[in-house]
C-alpha cells in the first residue's frame, strides 16, 4: 500500500517515471541522509535498508531496525519517506518496517546460552526496591513489542517470578532431556527456585556452589531463539551475586533503586560491581518515585523524587525512567497479571513500556559500539 504520494502543487502526480532511469544508488544516496537518532549513524551504513526495489516511479524497501521496541520507529519511517520522496522521479514510497534484534558479539557462538542474542541483568543493591517487579514488567513489555523474550529468575534468596506471572508448576523435560521453560504473556520463564529443595538452603550458598548450579541449570534449559533474556539477579553485591555476574554472559545491567537517600548508596555499589566485571550499565530505574492519590489525582513525592536520576547523573550512567507507587503494580504482582501486559488496564503500563523502549535502545547502542570496535580492530 503506498504510504507516501508526492504530488505537484496542482494535485496531479509528477510524471517523472516517464523519464525513466531511477537507480538504486540514487535511492541509497537519499537514504544515507537519514540517521537513526539513537545510534547516530545513517541507515545505509548501519545496513538497515533491505529488499530495495524500483518499479517505475514506485520505490519499495524494508527498514530493518535493531529492535522491535525501537522508540524512534515512526520518526525513522517519516524521515525515509521524506528523503526518498524528494528524489526526482519518485512518486510513491512503500516502506516495510521490521526488526532484527542486534546480537551481542560476546553471545554469538558461546555455548551456555546458544540461541540468546542479549542478556539483561535486572539488579539492585538491596532487597525490596522492586527489582523483580521491574524484571517481570520489562520482559512482558519487550514481548509485547514483538521480541522473543525469556525471563530467568536467578534470585536464589527468594524466587518470586513464577507467582508474579501466574505460573507455578514444575517445568517439563523434553525428549532430549532439556528443561522446557514455562510460558506466560509471551515470555519464556525459568526459575532457579525449581532447583532449590528448600529456601533456607539457598541462604547459605557460597560463590562456587552458585557457579556450578547455575552453569548446569543454564545449559539444560531449552530457551530456543531469544532476542532478550532478562535475568532477575539476587539483591546485593556479595559473593554469590558477583559469581552470578561472572557466570552469566551479560550484555548489560539495569539497576533498580528507590529514591530515598538510604537506597542510593546501594545502587551505587551495584553500578560499581558491574563496572568491575566489565558489564555495561544500561541504566538506572527509579521505582516508587511518587504517589498519585486516586481520589484527588494529587501527586505526592513521598521519598523526594529524583534521587535515581541524580545518582545516574553522578555515576555517568543513563537514567531509564521512573515508576510511581501504585496499588495496581502490587496487585498485578500478587494476582499474576503484570501491569505491562495488555490484559491489565492499569495506567502504569505506559511507564514500563517507556522503560522497555529505553532499555532496547541502550542494548542496540551497546551492540553497535561493540561492532564498531570489532571493525576498527580488524
Ligand atoms: P525486590 O525484587 O527488589 O525484592 P519486588 O519486586 O519483589 O522487590 O517488590 C517488593 C514488593 O513491593 C512487592 O510486593 C511488589 O508488588 C511491591 N512493589 C514493587 N514496586 C511497586 C510499585 N511501584 N508500586 C507498588 N508496589 C510495588
Image: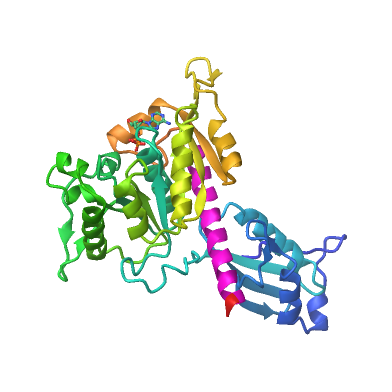
Residue 9 sits in which quadrant?
bottom right
Identify the residue at horizontal 39%, vertical 32% (top origin): 329
Q: Which residue is drawn at 23% across and 45% down?
A: 167
User: Residue at image x 55%, y 37%?
Assistant: 311
Position of residue 30 relative to residue 340, above or below, is: below
Report the predominant secondary structure element of the magenta stretch. helix
Position of residue 138 measured from the top left corner of the image (x, y, whole percent):
43, 46
Q: In this view, does 49 lie above or below 181?
A: below
Queried whether the magenta region covers residue 365, the answer comes back as: yes
Q: Is residue 185 visible?
A: no
Q: How many marks?
A: 0
Q: Is residue 203 magenta?
A: no
Q: Is residue 29 left or right of residue 261?
A: right
Instruction: Specify the farthest residue to the left.
Output: 197
Up-down relation of residue 274 to residue 160 (above or below): below
Q: Is residue 236 above or below residue 289?
A: below
Depth check, front residue: 325 or 206: 206
Question: Is residue 46 something that shows in the picture?
Answer: yes
Q: Quadrant of the C terminus?
A: bottom right
From the viewer's perspective, is 307 left or right of 179? right
Most distant residue in the right direction: 10
Residue 290 image position (x, y, % from top left):
51, 25
* Residue 168 drawn at (x, y percent): 20, 44
Residue 320, image x, y percentages: 54, 43
Specify the quadrant of the image occupied by residue 365.
bottom right
Quadrant where the image shows the N terminus: bottom right
Q: In which quarter of the image is ligand 1?
A: top left
Query: What span is in magenta?
Result: 350-376
Between 32 and 320, the one lying in front of the other is 320
Amino acid at each position: 500500500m503506498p504510504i507516501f504520494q508526492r504530488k505537484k502543487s496542482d494535485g496531479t502526480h509528477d510524471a517523472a517515471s516517464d523519464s525513466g532511469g531511477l537507480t538504486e544508488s540514487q535511492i541509497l544516496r537519499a537514504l544515507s541522509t537519514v540517521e537513526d537518532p539513537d545510534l547516530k549513524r545513517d541507515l545505509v551504513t548501519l545496513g538497515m535498508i533491505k529488499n530495495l526495489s524500483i518499479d517505475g516511479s514506485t520505490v519499495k524497501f524494508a527498514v530493518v531496525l535493531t529492535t522491535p521496541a525501537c522508540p524512534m520507529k515512526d520518526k525513522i519511517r517519516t524521515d525515509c519517506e521524506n528523503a526518498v520522496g524528494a528524489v526526482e522521479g519518485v512518486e510513491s514510497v512503500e516502506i516495510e518496517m521490521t526488526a532484527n534484534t542486534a546480537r551481542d558479539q560476546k553471545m554469538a557462538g558461546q555455548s551456555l546460552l546458544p540461541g540468546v542474542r542479549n542478556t539483561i541483568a535486572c539488579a539492585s543493591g538491596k532487597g525490596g526496591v522492586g527489582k523483580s517487579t521491574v524484571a517481570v514488567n520489562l520482559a512482558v513489555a519487550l514481548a509485547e513489542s514483538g521480541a522473543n523474550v525469556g525471563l530467568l529468575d536467578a534470585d536464589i534468596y527468594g524466587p518470586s517470578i513464577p507467582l508474579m506471572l501466574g505460573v507455578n508448576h514444575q517445568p517439563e523435560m523434553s525428549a532430549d532431556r532439556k528443561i522446557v521453560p514455562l510460558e506466560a504473556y509471551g515470555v519464556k520463564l525459568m526459575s532457579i527456585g525449581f532447583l532449590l529443595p528448600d529456601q533456607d538452603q539457598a541462604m547459605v550458598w557460597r560463590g562456587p556452589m552458585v557457579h556450578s548450579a547455575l552453569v548446569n541449570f543454564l545449559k539444560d534449559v531449552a530457551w530456543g531463539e531469544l532476542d532478550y533474556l532478562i535475568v532477575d539477579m539476587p539483591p546485593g553485591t556479595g559473593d554469590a551475586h558477583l559469581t552470578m555476574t561472572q557466570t552469566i554472559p551479560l550484555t548489560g545491567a539495569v539497576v533498580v533503586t528507590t529514591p530515598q537517600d538510604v537506597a542510593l548508596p546501594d545502587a551505587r555499589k551495584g553500578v560499581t560491581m558491574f563496572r568491575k566485571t566489565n558489564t555495561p550499565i544500561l541504566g538506572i530505574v527509579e521505582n516508587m518515585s511518587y504517589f498519585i492519590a486516586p481520589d484527588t489525582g494529587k501527586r505526592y513525592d513521598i521519598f523526594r523524587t529524583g534521587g535515581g536520576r541524580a545518582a545516574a547523573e553522578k555515576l555517568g550512567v543513563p537514567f531509564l525512567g521512573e515508576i510511581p507507587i501504585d496499588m495496581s503494580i502490587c496487585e498485578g504482582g500478587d494476582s499474576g497479571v503484570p501491569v505491562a501486559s495488555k490484559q491489565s488496564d492499569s495506567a502504569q503500563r505506559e511507564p514500563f513500556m517507556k522503560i522497555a523502549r529505553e532499555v532496547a535502545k541502550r542494548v542496540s547502542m551497546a551492540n553497535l559500539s561493540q561492532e564498531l570496535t570489532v571493525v576498527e580492530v580488524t
